[in-house]
Amino acid sequence: MKKFLALITLGLALTLTGCTPAEPIEVAADTVIIDVRTPEEFATGHLEGALLLDVQSAEFDALAAELDPDASYVVYCRSGNRAGTAIERLAALGITDAVNAGSVQDASDATGIPIVTE
């Protein structure tokens, strides 16, 4: 029973921390920042220079297929969950250098890129 509880506790800890970067994310000049939220969410505030690529839209895979598979990407959403889904879908398209930055605030904190509204 103690092992079971320890595994549950470890699983919860990993789940709660798995979507949020533990340390700063270095962003090079050619790193692409991708916001995978809806256009409405994007309009409320997004990282400066971020590309909107709604992971829930029917066009996501087609648009993502146009991305450079050799580039570096930082992906974020509202909580980190959709960013994780987007990274899995990007990987299926051959994009392997993608980091889940968690929420828009987490992404801003980790990258130092400000949140802006348009």
Image (cartoon, helix red, strand yellow):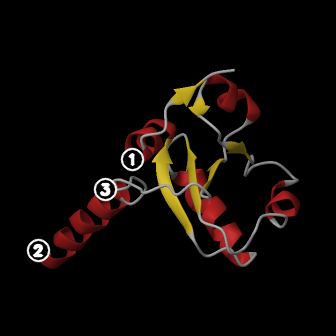
Distance between mark 2 and mark 3 Cα atoms: 31 Å
Taking the spot 56% from the left edge, 48% from the top edge, the residue there is: 76
Q: Position of residue 41 (x, y in %)?
A: 66, 30
Q: Nearest the camera: 27 or 105?
A: 27
The answer to whether residue 1 is above or below residue 39 is below
Mark 3 touches mark 1? (CB < 8 Å) = yes
Residue under pointer 3: 23
- Earlier in the chain: of badge 1 and badge 2, it is 2
Disc 2, SS: helix
Question: Which dot, 2 or 3, sits closer to the camera?
Answer: 3
Residue 87, label in figure: none
Circle 2 crowding by C-alpha within 10 Å: few under 14, some 14–19, many from 20:
few
Amino acid type for the residue under numbered disc 1: Ala
In this rendering, would 5 be left or right of 107?
A: left
Distance between mark 1 and mark 2 Cα atoms: 36 Å
The answer to whether residue 46 is above or below residue 99 is above
Residue 2, label in figure: 2
